[in-house]
């Protein structure tokens, strides 16, 4: 995305200052560049320094809402005092979480429509942070329509993502609309499309693709450059060459019980088989298999136990927003299950590594030297 990049400054401090100056802003940072800590730092200042906001809502993918924001607040001394309530689970559990006194309320994006209906015009959140703004790129989705209804009631709205256009320039309209309510790219998607695109492949009145008009990309980026900032690690931000981001995988209670059974008894009773580690020395290997999501029996047949690790990998791929991701695996069952879950994945020749390339094209384009994937 060709937006102004930041040179000769510390990237995170620039982003903090930028959000303080922009009630509506798109923060487009690659994974590992600190979007969450930046947003929490500014939210804390608005809550407790300037008192501009009283309640913060974070809309995020389910596993990110469950873990990432609370873990990030506990990680930094200046954020540990923030009270975070997770608006997750059943409707009763969500209502109870909303009733708690907190600073930041985290909800998964699938429940945005429920939340808007629950509050109606009594919307209480004056700062809304949309984690993975690109997941609101579809103007026909229920989540977009719901958030659009209450957008006039929101004082501050920030959208965080790695890149806002994983597929097409068309994807920008809905995301930018949530920031500025149509001020820059128009109040309707149809008007935006007609102004900056022309029909491509079509069959009669059915249009299969829209192509940007000449110069459209530069025009659109120029229009949104005052409320969106994009940072790249290469040559623009003073950061280490390698950025490590740890994504813990929290096993479900059912998977945890299986893990503890093997750890305690060196035995795992499944519906169709009994897995016996054979010796204490073999237990560690079985535990690693279970953590990966499946376990081998004595005939080397894999029995799938859970998808927790694959679910987190799916979140990582979404955050990468179309950029290729290298995935190292330990066991063949992990490879097979990754390949089945993500059909666009490609196994690298003579390597225990998989690359999930851009889109579904199979076009394997590797990250630059110094970049890292997911293990």
Image (spheres, helix red, strand yellow):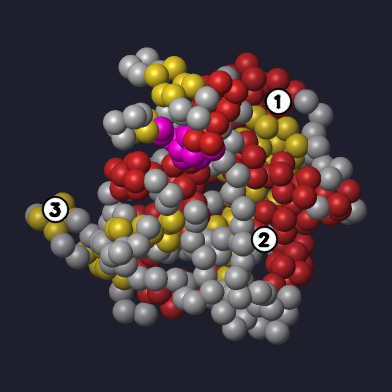
Residue drawn at point x = 49 percent, y = 35 percent: 282
Tell which of 279 and 105 is nearer to you: 279
Residue 205 circle label: 3
Q: Residue at x 34, y 29 (%)?
A: 298
Q: Mark 1 = which residue?
A: 97
The span from disc 3 to disc 1 (Cα, nearest Å) is 49 Å
Q: State if disc 3 and disc 2 touch (CB < 8 Å).
A: no
> In the rendered structure, does residue 364 fall within the stretch colored magenta?
no
Mark closer to the chain start, 2 or 1: 2
**Most distant residue in the right direction:** 49
For image coordinates 59% across by 83% down, the residue present is: 235
Q: Residues within 10 Å of mark 3 (few under 14, many from 20)?
A: few
Q: Which image quadrant for residue 30?
A: bottom right
Depicted 238 relative to depicted 171: above or below: below
Mark 2 crowd level (few <14, some 14–19, many ≥20, 10 Å Cα): some
x and y percentages locating residue 222 in the rendered image: 51, 76
Which range of residues does the magenta coloring cover?
284-295
Tell me where residue 115 sits by quadrant.
top right
CA distance separating discs 2 and 1: 27 Å
Which mark is in front, 2 or 3?
2
The disc at residue 177 is: none
Asked if the magenta segment contains residue 292, the reply would be: yes
* On screen, residue 46 above or below 263: below
Which residue is located at x 46 percent, y 28 percent?
A: 277
Side of 214 where 229 appears, left or right: right
Q: Earlier in the sequence, mark 2 or mark 3?
A: 2
Q: Can residue 291 be seen by looking at this rendering?
A: no
Could you tell me which secondary element the residue under label 3 belongs to?
A: loop
Residue ID for mark 2: 34
Q: Is residue 63 left or right of residue 200?
A: right
> Residue 148: where, in percent of width, then height?
53, 43
């Amino acid at each position: 995305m060709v937006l102004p990049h930041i040179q000769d400054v510390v990237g995170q401090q620039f982003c903090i200052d930028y959000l303080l100056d922009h009630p509506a802003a798109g923060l487009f940072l690659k994974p590992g560049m600190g979007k969450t800590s930046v947003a929490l730092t500014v939210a804390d200042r608005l809550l407790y320094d300037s008192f501009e906001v009283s309640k913060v809502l974070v809309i995020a993918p389910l596993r990110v809402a469950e873990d990432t924001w609370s873990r990030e607040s506990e990680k930094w001394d200046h954020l540990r005092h923030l009270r975070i309530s997770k608006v997750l689970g059943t409707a009763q559990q969500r209502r109870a979480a909303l009733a708690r006194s907190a600073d930041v309320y985290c909800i998964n994006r699938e429940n945005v429509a429920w939340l808007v209906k629950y509050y109606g015009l009594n919307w209480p959140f004056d700062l809304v942070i949309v984690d993975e703004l690109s997941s609101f790129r579809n103007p026909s989705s229920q989540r977009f329509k719901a958030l659009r209804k209450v957008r006039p009631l929101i004082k501050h709205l920030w959208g965080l993502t790695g890149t806002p256009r994983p597929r097409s320039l068309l994807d920008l309209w809905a995301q930018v609309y949530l920031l500025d309510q149509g001020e820059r790219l128009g109040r309707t998607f149809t008007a935006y499309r007609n102004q900056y695109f022309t029909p491509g492949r079509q069959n009669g009145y059915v249009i299969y693709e829209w192509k940007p008009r000449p110069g459209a990309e530069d025009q659109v980026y120029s229009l949104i450059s005052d409320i969106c900032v994009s940072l790249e690690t290469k040559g623009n931000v003073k950061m280490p060459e390698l950025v490590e981001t740890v994504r813990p995988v929290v096993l479900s209670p059912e998977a945890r019980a299986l893990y503890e059974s093997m750890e305690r008894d060196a035995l795992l009773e499944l519906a169709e088989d009994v897995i016996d580690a054979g010796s204490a020395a073999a237990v560690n290997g079985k535990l690693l298999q279970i953590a990966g999501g499946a376990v081998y029996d004595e005939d080397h047949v894999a029995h799938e136990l859970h998808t927790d690790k694959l679910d987190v990998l799916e979140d990582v791929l979404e955050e990468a927003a179309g950029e290729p991701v290298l995935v190292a695996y330990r066991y063949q069952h992990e490879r097979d299950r990754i390949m089945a879950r993500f059909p666009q994945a490609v196994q690298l020749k003579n390597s225990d590594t998989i690359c999930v390339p851009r889109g579904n094209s199979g076009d394997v384009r590797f990250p630059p030297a110094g970049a890292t994937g997911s293990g």
